[in-house]
Structures are given as structure tokens and as C-alpha cells.
Image (cartoon, rainbow, N blue to C red):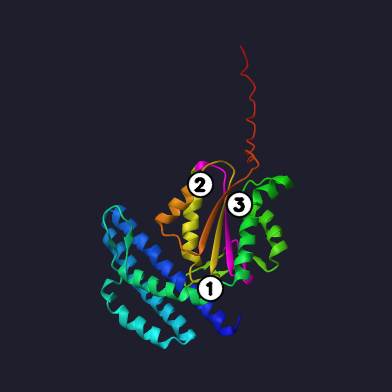
Amino acid sequence: MNDTYSIAARALASAQNRIQECRLQIFNISDADAHMEGPERDDYLNDLTTAFKTQTYNAKASIGIVYNILGLTDSLRGLEADFEAVRDTVGVVSYVDPFDGAFNEAIDYLQARLELLVPLLEVPSQTQAQRMILTRVLRQLPQFIEHGGMLPTREKDVQDQLHPVLRLSFPDVIREAAVPKQTKTYFPDFGIDSIATAVEVKFVETKSKAALAIGGLYEDMKGYAASVFTHFIGLVYMTGNFLTQEQVEAELRKVQTPKNWEVYVVFGMGAPNPSPVRPKKAKTAPPDQP
């Protein structure tokens, strides 16, 4: 892979992530619009909309960078000219009807332009093959853990057992690889530079924590967007049948999960959480009898 292709591929991934940031923001705005009440509602929606406008123009600039790297000057001029037709919709969240998902015309236009670039910079077949191996390792993790006999009681236990397994196939795997952003730094559980992939692990031992785990992945999607990684996998390790793969996928569709995210649910055994030992109550001598 030559340097220009490599740089363009990373720029394309960055543009895709920025588009997905915009789609996540559309969901945030529509959700707040539907459910939020009180005097702070309008100010909150205005803040979300202002951020959404900035994100939209950043996404447009990212697509322009890809055109520049590839030397597609006519396409860049077309992007600028055609965007004028949807400029008035920047920051405006619309609905087909009250039951349909929210959308934005400017983002839909930018998404269409971006998809024209994807065939020019497809992921190399070797990277795709390596990512398939990674997926297979993750989905078979419960069998490895059960065979080893060290059953997990928390998320870190799953991570600790997954780490040496990943190193067998991916020697460059990094534990808690940093993803710096403007306001804070995010740390996916594992990062693999050779295939530009990050892995996030969630451990669920009760039904009440299942929804929290999926919500945590949703927050991770926002935090890891526009990072050096171009592919993300969420692994939800459950010790019971709390959620199905289909339920998780349906839930993530509601928030318009980025296309470069995959989330898998696996079922494995977990060790019982030891109950805290309570100190025995001191016995008191019975009162003296008269």
C-alpha cells in the first residue's frame, strides 16, 4: 500500500466517523426534543444544535480532505457547489412522520458523497481477513475461559483472560490504547494498530446491568469517533440469557450505530460474587436474675 493510499484511507475513515458523530447527534436532539421538559429544555436543545452545526461542517471539511489527497479537484468543486442546495438545512432535524427516525438533509447529502469514495479506498483483503480472525477469537472466548477454569466475576477478569489470547494472533495489541479528544482522553480496552481496530469489553452478570452495558457502548461510540482506529468491536460477555443478539442490534439501530462498529453478545459462565462477610454480633450476657 503506497503512502497516498494509506493517508487517503485514514482520511476516509475520519470522514466516516465524523458523519457518524453527526448521526449520533441527530439522535440526541430528537431524543431530547421528545422527552425533555422544564425551563432548561430550550437552552439544552440550542446547545445541541450549535454543536451539530459545527459537526456538520467538520464532516464536510473531512470529505474535502479526501478529495484533495486523491487529487479529485472536480469532485471537490462539485461538493462545494452542490452543498449550497442543502446549506439551509444544516442543524435542522426533520421527521418523515412522528413514528419514523429523525434525519437531516445536509448529512444525508454528505453521506451519499462519502459512499462514492468508499469503492476507491476499500479495506485491503488482508486486513479484512485479520479482522475476521479477531471476531472469531472474541466470539469463542467463553469456551476458552470455561476450559481454563478461572471464571470471571467482573469486567477486568474477562479483559485479563482475553489479553494473552489476542497477543497470540496480534502481537501489537495494546491494553487501554489512548484516544485523545479535545476535552478528555478515552481508553478502549484493546487497540490493534496493524488492523486499525479497537475492542471494548462489557461484563454483565445481572439483567439490570444489561441495558447499562449497551448504553455504555453507545457512549463509547461517541468517544472513539474520529480516532486513529477505523473499526470497532464491542463484546458483551453475559453470564445469563439477559439479552439476545437480535435485541442488541435492534437497540443499536435506534441510535444509528456507526457502520464501522460491530457488537457481539456471548454467553459464558461466571463465578459467584463472594458476599461480604458481616461481623458477628457480640453476644451479651443475660441480665442478672433477682
Amino acid type indicated by mark 2 = Ala
Between 4 and 57, the one lying in front of the other is 4
Q: Earlier in the sequence, mark 3 or mark 1?
A: 1
Q: Name the residue under label 2.
A: 210
Q: Mark 3 points at which residue?
A: 155
- Residue 18 position, x and y percent, is 43, 71
Amino acid type indicated by mark 1 = Glu
Left or right placement of residue 272 versus residue 23 in this view: right
Residue numbers of the magenta segment: 188-207
What residue is drawn where x is 55% and y is 53%?
264
Q: Name the residue under label 1.
A: 122
**Counting other residues with Cα less than 10 Å from the Cα at mark 1, is it few (<14), some (14-19), or many (20 or more)?**
few
- Residue 7 position, x and y percent, is 54, 81
23 is higher (above) or lower (below) than 15: above
Q: Could you tell me which secondary element the residue under label 1 belongs to?
A: loop
Is residue 176 visible in the rendered image? The answer is no
What residue is drawn where x is 31% and y is 83%?
81
Is residue 146 visible in the rendered image? The answer is yes
**Counting other residues with Cα less than 10 Å from the Cα at mark 2, is it few (<14), some (14-19), or many (20 or more)?**
many
105 is higher (above) or lower (below) than 138: below
The quarter in which the N terminus is drawn is bottom right
131 is higher (above) or lower (below) than 248: below
Between 55 and 83, the one lying in front of the other is 83
Rounded to the nearest angstrom, the CA distance separating label 2 from label 1 is 35 Å
- What is the quadrant of residue 110 in the picture? bottom left
Asked if residue 226 is among those painted magenta in the image, a careful observer would answer no
- Residue 10 position, x and y percent, is 53, 76
Amino acid type indicated by mark 3 = Glu
